[in-house]
Image: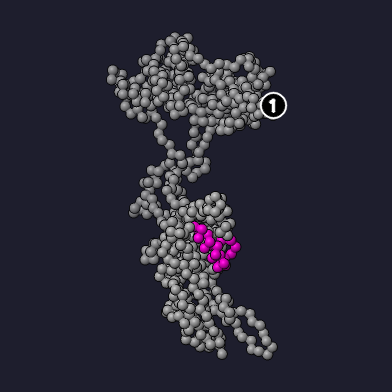
Amino acid sequence: MVPDFGGWATKANLKCSDGRTILPDAFKHMDGQQVPLVYMHGHKDIENVLGYAVLEHRDGEGVYCKAYFNETPGGKNAKLQVQHGDIKHLSIMANQLVEKVIAGGKSVIHGMIREVSLVLAGANPGAVIDFVRIAHSDDPDDYTELTDEAVIKTGTEIELSHAIDGVDDTKPDAKTTDSGEGPTLQQAYDNLDDDTKGLVTALVEAALEAGAQHSDGDPKDGEPKDGEPKDGEPTDDNPEGDLNHQEGTGAMTRNVFDQSATGTGSDKKTLTHAEFRDIAKKAVKAGSLKAILDETALEHGVENIEVLFPDAKAISATPEWNKRRTEWVASVLNGVDRRPYSRIKTLVADITQDEARAKGYITGSYKKEEWFSVTTRKTGPTTIYKKQKLDRDDMIDVTDFDIVAWLWGEIRLMIEEEIARAILFGDGRDVSDPDHIADPMAAASGDGIRSITNEHELYMTTVNVNLDDASSSYHELVESILRARRFYKGTGLPTFYTTEAVLTELLLLKDEANSNRRLYSSVEDLANALRVRSIIPVEAMESAESDLVGIIVNLSDYTVGTDRGGELTRFDDFDIDYNQYKYLMEARMSGALTKIKSAQVIRKTAAANVLVSPDKPTFVASTGVVTIPSKTGVIYQDASDSSVLTAGAQAALAAGESITVQAVPAAGYYFATNADDSWTFKRPAA
């Protein structure tokens, strides 16, 4: 079969841009091998396989390849582009690369070509080896080279079939054994799995490094005399030679299995090259090189055979944190309103009462003054900190990564999560705990971060729902949220913060009347149904208050205040007495909702509780008489002192006097919300 084109897969003795040189025989053992022909090394997509290439080793020059396109659409298209001159360059992907320092420079002496690829641009000038690199520590310029896989480009242009010298019109057959008695060492090597090949390559490299230590020309013990073939060199019986030694640079001064550094007597424990060949043949049949090596080690008294196998390598540069999911933290901290002062003051004027309404005017009559109440609230700052320490000895001993940068990352991660928790539902620690982040609502003080779940009902509406009753379902949660939406007075569309468990139950809701079809196909569909901008799962909420289902809020209505110098700041110091470095990150800030009715907190009530709605008391403004209704499950109180008001007419209010009536559920009952449970009445002044 006439090849469609030919070209140099790799050129010998070219110094690559990274300083390495590809030696002439580095890929000699690949002569006659067939490898896939792909486009731009896209070997992960079968559509990128365009055909195959046959490798041809040329002494002193490198590896030439003859390529044959397949009949797939991709192959046909690539063939036309090559013939037209649109694609002119080749590249190879090789692994199991072995390099050695020769004459002060690094040289590639062995490797396996896995594919030949058509590429849009070759290297210029000479050759290029693109090693896979991984970032190390926190220094972006510090890299570790993984030399087991590389892309090698030569920059030479490909040749069409009519320009190829010495074209073989037939597709080369696969190699057969030399003597008919079994597979050659090359074939045995090719049949090994990647892990075993990596071990053999490591052994080859160790042997080559040991061989380079010879400085005289006299043969050592066990080496062939002048005129005799050396181990691994081609012979009449084995023209291919030993794969492990055909790149050889001299004999080994010490066998890698040798357990004695200086012994020369009968107690010296060694394995000969012939025995190692036998090991390789057994490994091919058994399918496990390690098992055969263990068996051989016992026979020859070799100890610590495990040192021949590579150590485990970490897949990441730094240890991975076993932590809660914290994606929600950024949503909270980026969403709040930030102010450059830490003392926050809010003023609220209640103009919802009838007395505050605009009034019609009758000519000649007296114009009444408007009446409304003004409420003020102040919130001061508190300090939040996270502290860590490191022994200097540990810092010196840890060399795999920058432990200080890693520790700073942990400190910032944890303090930001704690601030976000304090904003949404508090840190969960008891008020008496010295580590507790001050919550003015929980501690009845004025300084700290006011958690939304503990906010005053002027700023937050509580929505209650029974989800544990035998006849209840999460349909009731959706309905309760939608019915309570009329009380939301926050900015724009809010966000629903909840747990993964609640989100899952909502997504699993089905239309039982329509073949059990899922009601919400995605989180976005559910968010639209709940009239929220997005739904964000908060893992930390799972360990917060047991009855907390979720929080609906637009955090632009929550203000965080910080004076200059009180923002999140890092400090470090060295303790000479204890030989320790200490690290501190802290902030001094305040936080509170600053827009009334801007949040809704959804809570779960006890399964046995019964839903009840309070009735509004009646009021006669002219007489100042308030009448309390009789309602099962509802208790009416005077909000000023929480005293219980009995059903029926109350004592008349004096002129200009007012009263606020508060309704609370009796034991075993609950209200849908706390938004319709308070009423203020005032008798007009005389």
Quadrant of the drawing holding the C terminus:
bottom right
Q: Is residue 215 above or below residue 368?
A: above
Query: Which residue is label 1 attached to?
Result: 80
Q: Is residue 504 above or below residue 314?
A: below
Residue 122: horizontal and vertical position, in percent?
A: 63, 29
Q: Is residue 47 magenta?
A: no
Residue 546: horizontal and vertical position, in percent?
A: 42, 60
Q: Is residue 385 visible?
A: no
Q: Is residue 618 above or below residue 586?
A: below
Q: Is residue 268 visible?
A: yes
What residue lies at 44% left-to-right and 75% top-to-bottom?
A: 635
Residue 297: horizontal and vertical position, in percent?
A: 33, 24
Quarter where residue 357 is shown: bottom right
Quadrant of the drawing holding the N terminus:
top right
Q: How many numbered callouts?
A: 1
Q: Is residue 477 magenta?
A: yes
What residue lies at 39% left-to-right and 62% top-to-bottom?
A: 429
Residue found at the very far right of the displayed protein: 84
**401 or 326: nearer the eye?**
326
Residue 248: horizontal and vertical position, in percent?
A: 46, 19
Mark 1 Cα shell of 10 Å, populated few (<14), some (14-19), many (≥20):
few
Q: Amino acid at mark 1?
A: Leu
**543 or 434: nearer the eye?**
543
Quarter where residue 664 is shown: bottom left
The residue stretch that appears in magenta: 474-494
Regarding mark 1 in the picture, which secondary structure is present there?
Answer: helix
Name the dominant secondary structure of the magenta segment.
helix
What colour-coding does the image apply? one colour
What residue lies at 37% left-to-right and 49% top-to-bottom?
A: 391
What residue lies at 51% left-to-right and 64% top-to-bottom?
A: 600
